[in-house]
Image (cartoon, rainbow, N blue to C red):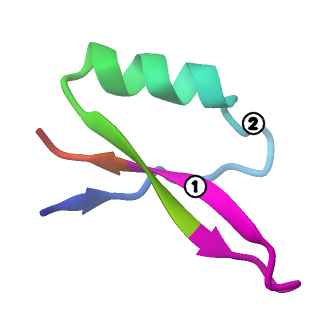
Amino acid sequence: MHLVQLASCSMHRPRHAEVHSMAERHGFRIESVPMKNTHHELIRKSLVLKP
C-alpha cells in the first residue's frame, strides 16, 4: 500500500470535501483511519492512497 501525503501550505488548507473531490478526480482512493490526539481522544483522519 502506498501512502501519498498532501503538502500543506500555510496560506491555504484544503477543506475535507475539496480533498475528497481532488482524490476522486485523479483516481486516488481515500480511507478513514482511527487515531488518537494528544488528549488521547479518538479521532478519524483520511488517508489518500494511490490506486
Going by the numbered disc 2, the residue's amino acid type is: His
- Nearer to us of marks 2 and 1 is 1
41 versus 5 height, above or below: below
Reading the image, the residue beneath label 1 is: 45
Query: What span is colored magenta in the figure?
Result: 35-47
Q: In which quarter of the image is residue 15?
A: top right
Residue at left offset 60%, top offset 72%: 35
Count residues near mark 1 (Cα–Cα under 10 Å), then give few for <14, some for 14-19, many for 20+.
few
Image side of residue 9 versus residue 51, left or right: right
Magenta stretch encompasses residue 10: no
Q: Position of residue 9 (x, y in %)?
A: 68, 49
**Foreground: 30 or 27?**
30
Q: Quadrant of the image for the C terminus?
A: top left
Residue at left offset 12%, top offset 63%: 1
Q: Where is residue 46 in the image (x, y as percent from the top left)?
A: 50, 48
Magenta stretch encompasses residue 42: yes
Image side of residue 12 versus residue 2, left or right: right
Image side of residue 9 versus residue 30, left or right: right
Secondary structure beneath disc 2?
Answer: loop
Residue at left offset 24%, top offset 21%: 26
Going by the numbered disc 1, the residue's amino acid type is: Lys
Q: Where is residue 2 in the image (x, y as percent from the top left)?
A: 16, 61
Give the distance between the C-alpha atoms of the residues marked 2 and 1, in whole angstroms: 19 Å
Count residues near mark 2 (Cα–Cα under 10 Å), then give few for <14, some for 14-19, many for 20+.
few
7 versus 40 height, above or below: above
Q: Where is residue 41 in the image (x, y as percent from the top left)?
A: 80, 75
Q: Residue 12 carries which label?
A: 2
**Foreground: 12 or 51?**
51
As drawn, the residue found furthest toward the front would be: 42
Q: Of the residues under marks 2 and 1, which one precedes in the sequence?
A: 2
